[in-house]
Amino acid sequence: MGTTARELYERGRDASNAQRYAAARRLLERASARATDAGADLQSRIAGTMAYVLAQTGEAARAEALCREALDRDGVSAETQAIVAGQLGLLFTRAGRLDDADEMLTRAITSLSGTARANCLLNRSLVHMHRRAFAASTADLEQAVTIYEAEGDAAAAAEARHNLGYTALLRGDLVEALELMARSRPVIAAGSPEGAAMSDLDRAEVLRDAGLVDEAERLLDSVATTFGAAGMRQSQAEAEYHLARSLVRHDPARAEGVARSAARRFRALGAESWAARSDAIRLDARLARTLANDLRGGRSAALPAAAEFAATVETLSACGFPAEATAVRFSAALAADQRGEPDAAERLPRLARDSPTPLRLRAAEVRAARAQAHGRSTEARRHAAHGLDLLSDWQRSFGALDLQVSLAMHGTGLIFRGLAAAGDSRDPAILFDWSERARHLSQQVAPVRPPRDGHLADDLATLRMLRTDLSGTEWTTDPRVRALRDRVRDRQWTETGAGDLRPRVTLDELRASLDPDTAVLSYVFTGASLLCLVTTADASRIVDLDWPDVKRASDGLRADLDVSAAIRSGPMAEVVARALDDRMLRLDEALLGPLRIAIGTRRLVLTVPGLLAGIPWAMLPTNHARPFTLATSVSRWMQERPTAAPMRSVGFVGGPRVPRAVEEVHAAASAWPDPAVLIGENARVDAVTDLAGRVDLLHIAAHGHHAVDNPLFAGFELADGTLFGYDVDLIPHPPETVVLSACELGHSSVRWGEEALGMTRVWLHAGTRSVIAAPAVVSDDIASTLLAAVHLGLSRDESPAVALAAASEATGHRTPFQCHGSGF
């Protein structure tokens, strides 16, 4: 006797649940052929499962017809009718027909029990998510989890818990979202590659909303490929949609193409609501291209027509996506303003208080842009400030440094609108306020230490071993490294609590606190121009700088610095030195030349945007032998000045493979009466972090590794592997001052146009007051001589910035070493 229709159906259903849709379809077709005499009930169940497979592989219309036919068949039990209604409800959900979906799924839920009921609860939660009815979504999912666990279905419980994480994402709680998804992923991924991809699709949304777009986009590219290979056209299109959403901020040209592809796939599947959402991204991308080109003075892309915006709004509204429709209305208003239509302001919609935070930020940005375009600078600043206050409230819930910085992505447009309007005011107090807002966007939260975690320590230890064994390329691509890095970051996000908000100071408060020998230089980049606010005890004035000149003088700077450090003798040395001197003169004239009269011989506090993070300020002629510090913000500098105290306990670390590390450490340590020194096999990660928690001053001479994608994985090479930024962030009582004699670790990754995050920032975020580091390579012999002289000054209670300036003058070495934070 051959395989029965029921056995084939059950095997087909299992294959469908495992996302093996080609196999499922073959089995269900065989089951259907053998079920002609098996009764209406089995025939309807086969049709319902086949409908799900067809919908997943791009035949939505045929899937709906099969379900309708099954519901109309005579002799079908109430339970089977409910199961088919649930399948039809899921089809309607995917097509964006939310009212129809809710009706069918509710009908199913009232008639089912056990796992079948839980499945429909899970699917109805998606309808609630689309409607942003988060309480209802959470209630359905919690019921589903309870049922699945009672039935012993761990995989389904994991999926429901994952969807609870997705609901948290939509609410804006990224940490809870990541925690729930991370708990669920191992179970989901064990089922099939497609199941893992479904989990990763939602995880990529969390990473994108957290601002970690590089990781999000790599993940989305990967899952789109997986779905395509499996013939899962709906899921493939959803991955493309989310990829376009991520790209639109930094690569609008590619975003436009990806969004167009996603819309085309959705329309082929009959998913018109998803197609309209993709159209919204495509319109935003075209608008972003136009605005960016206008800002740069380049050739503008054609603005989308008003009719395109209107059609997309109408479709989204009809399909039950009011938040997306409202976002498109704001984009339409901005485009109308660009076209010079005078009534655009009248079409700006009002938002409810419970609207999603990204939508409220978008509304503030558009209102600020419109006000600025019409010359209403005060109104533009008010709208931009309101948006940044919303963002600050969101950021305050997170203590992890990388998450704070990444969330700044959402405020980039607001910052540039506010800075431009502040510059237009020509009021020093207003420009200073906005300069500090820009600095505080990712630096306003004081850290809160997570509890010690043995699993975290184990993961970091494994990463240290892999960092030693793998080359640079292997380190960035090895799947073991990626999995461990994800786990370390996820644990840090979920275990680090919110910190205290550091208040901003006013310009009047700054001037009242300044002595006659100090000037503050607040450099401000508005997106199109570079300004500097010069503040002394008796005056403040705004100076316009030539941004094109600065940019020309900066192009190729890093390469020149590296070559200069490498070639110090031989026939080319003089040529290289002369070329670097010429570049330093040009940078000096562009950045400090217009300010020389105002600053005189004063020591300097500088705050700079990310675009100037790589400037070697100590090598500019105007700053020769002048004490200066690169402050994270003027507000923090003022707040930390009174806490400065003499350094009494000092520690030195010499890492492996640095030719003069031991010599440098002993020469510098000789300036102190009782230094702690770790060299050779004693310079291990645990010993160094322990030492760092016990001393006022820590000096590390070791090779450094810079990590552009996440600087918390940058670090120092020690005897037993790399000391990562994550290790630093866990030190309970970090040193007051840190000296980094390591290649590249003063270098910063510029993120979102205003912020910079590097190993210096890791120490400063951890609570260190000042860090001496270089943004470029310095030869070992020069670093050794210069830093030994720095310690002579520090041992005489000179501040770090004063000691560094004096050492530079005494040794005659002009290097990129500079003081960060509160250097005096």
Image (spheres, grey):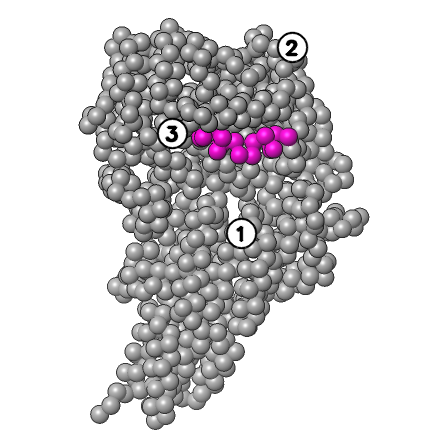
Image x and y of residue 775, in percent: 45, 28
> Label 3, label 2: how many angstroms apart (C-alpha)?
40 Å
Which residue occupies the extreme right position in the image? 342
Q: Secondary structure at mark 1?
A: helix
N-term mark: 3 or 2:
2
Which residue is located at x 68 percent, y 22 percent?
A: 542
Judging by the rendered image, the residue that carries numbered circle 1 is 247
Q: Nearer the viewer, residue 63 or 200?
A: 200
The three-letter amino acid code for the residue at tag 1 is Leu
Judging by the rendered image, the residue that carries numbered circle 2 is 538
Residue 188 vertical position relative to residue 350 in the rendered view, above or below: below
Judging by the rendered image, the residue that carries numbered circle 3 is 743
Image x and y of residue 473, in percent: 35, 46
Q: Secondary structure at mark 2?
A: loop
Image x and y of residue 35, in percent: 35, 89
Residue 86 vertical position relative to residue 764 in the rendered view, above or below: below
Image x and y of residue 268, in percent: 55, 73
Classify residue 680 by image quadrant.
top left
